[in-house]
Image: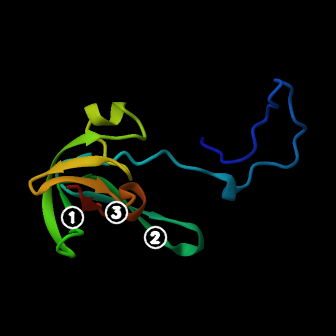
Amino acid sequence: MIIQARSRRKASGGRYKKLRARKKYMLGREPTLTKIGETSLKIQRGRGGSLKFKLLQTKFANIYNPKTKKSIKAEIKSVTENRANPQFVRSNIITKGAVINTDKGKARVTSRPGQEGIVNAVLLE
């Protein structure tokens, strides 16, 4: 179980006194590691009944070209750089800030695929 609450331990290693029981709003979830493949989504209910579209796999990205000010759909070939985690490059995991190699050239991901359900990127020169 992932809980997004204060740690039970102090920096010194001592324990904090328990303030309250765990509440539902403290729950967290495992990260969605978006990979390259046939497009598949997972729909999850958020707080207030809102929906979250988690992108599990995708083959295409919306690439914005700043010079022409146009967007095009491009096929993702591989992940070439990821500052979030260097291991993500080996397993082709797409996160925000990752540099992807597409058939139109290299592009930096600007969206959060695991949260928004789509891959948007900006073309790099």
Kindly identify the amino acid type of the residue bearing the numbered disc 1.
Ile
Q: Name the residue under label 2.
A: 51
For mark 1, does the 10 Å Cα neighbourhood hold few (<14), some (14 to 19), or many (20 or more) residues?
A: many
Q: Mark 3 points at which residue?
A: 117
Way the structure is coloured: rainbow
Q: Which label sits in the foreground, 3 or 2?
A: 3
Q: Cβ–Cβ below 8 Å for labels 3 and 2? A: no
> Is 27 located above or below residue 61 in the figure?
above
Q: Which mark is residue 63?
A: 1
For mark 2, does the 10 Å Cα neighbourhood hold few (<14), some (14 to 19), or many (20 or more) residues?
A: few
Residue extending furthest toward the left? 103
Q: Cβ–Cβ below 8 Å for labels 1 and 2? A: no
The alpha-carbon separation of the residues under discs 3 and 1 comes to: 15 Å
Residue for point 35% across, 57% down: 113
Residue for point 65% across, 45% down: 3
Residue 40 coordinates in the image, percent (x, y): 25, 57
Quarter in which the C terminus is drawn: bottom left
The answer to which quarter of the image holds residue 112 is bottom left
For mark 3, does the 10 Å Cα neighbourhood hold few (<14), some (14 to 19), or many (20 or more) residues?
A: many
Disc 3 secondary structure class = loop
Kindly identify the amino acid type of the residue bearing the numbered disc 3.
Gly
Quarter in which the N terminus is drawn: top right
Disc 2 secondary structure class = strand
First in residue order: circle 3 vs circle 2? 2
The alpha-carbon separation of the residues under discs 1 and 2 comes to: 25 Å
Residue for point 88% across, 47% down: 19
